[in-house]
Amino acid sequence: MTDIFIEMDPRFDLVILAAGMGSRFGGLKQVQPVGPAGELIIEYSTYDALQAGFGRLVLVIRKDIEAEFRATIGRRLEARMEVAYVFQETGAGRTKPWGTGHAVLAARAAVQRPFAVINADDFYGAAGYRTLAAHFAASPDYAMVGYPLKQTLSEFGTVSRGLCGTDATGRLKSITEITKIEKTGSGARYTDANGAIKALTGDEIVSMNFWGFTPQVFPHLEKLFVDFQAKNAADPKAEFYLPTALSTLNERGDAKVALLRSSDAWFGITYREDLAASQAAIRALIAAGEYPAPLWR
């Protein structure tokens, strides 16, 4: 398999949220190799996006980790595509970033065309990028790429997921955060706020923070963030979450969000034991001809 992405039309941007990474990369799950040549999940995400027409990468990081990030991760990506760095700052009195909604807002100056948003440490599969690129070519609406719950569960513990609700047209209407979801033989289950056990089929569509936007989203996010700061200035742990912001825009009629579906499996490294499963998944994809080995030739 040869690299063909250099010749592709770079129609879209890919914004990767990486401000949550710490200053010591060696022990963090985001930088545990999953590929046979030591490739990271973020490299497979970049590769898939390139193949789908995402020709420019915007990395959202913190200023205090810039030098180490560039040296350990950025240099791998800069050799493959155009990379811009933007910084998500914590603000006075805070020790952690303001959340995913604020992270996207931080990328405002670097983005001028339709763009995808993903987490740095999640593997989404090539189909999601192709599906989102096709959506951008056909519609001005925003979009979220969702996954069946059963494709996102861990064998080694509980997970939290955003359960998606749709309106009569099939657009995304709401995202309900559900915590402590565990896999069962027939699907999944969780315990609600009242202590009752609720069953899930596993076919429910959930959000894994894979979004598609146009730059028109930024003024809306900025206004919501200003309001959020005014209400939460005294709470150092409050976070401006992207799903919550989009739900608000939906309710106000300021956004239309298409709910797209990926045929690929999502995976991430929630528990230490998930690493071996992720490595095995990559090996299977390589054996099926989905990726070259090594990834970059």
Image (cartoon, grey):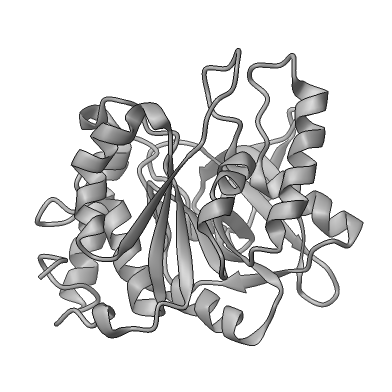
Location of residue 177 in the rendering, given as x and y in whole percent from the top left corner:
68, 42
Please tell me which residue lies in front, 185 or 277.
277
Q: Is residue 200 left or right of residue 227?
A: left
Decide if residue 187 is in sight here. no
Q: Quadrant of the N terminus?
A: bottom left
* Residue at x 48% of width, y 72% of height: 12
Q: Quadrant of the C terminus?
A: bottom left
Q: Quadrant of residue 37?
A: bottom left
Above-or-below relation of 13 to 169:
above
Please tell me which residue lies in front, 164 or 16.
16
Above-or-below relation of 43 to 142:
above
Q: Residue furthest right?
A: 252
Please tell me which residue lies in front, 180 or 145.
145
Location of residue 202 in the rendering, given as x and y in whole percent from the top left corner:
58, 58
Above-or-below relation of 268 to 99:
below
Q: Quadrant of residue 132?
A: bottom right
Q: Is residue 52 left or right of residue 280?
A: right
Location of residue 103 in the rendering, given as x and y in whole percent from the top left corner:
56, 42
Decide if residue 163 is in sight here. yes
Location of residue 292 in the rendering, given as x and y in whole percent from the top left corner:
15, 73
Q: Is residue 31 left or right of residue 266?
A: left
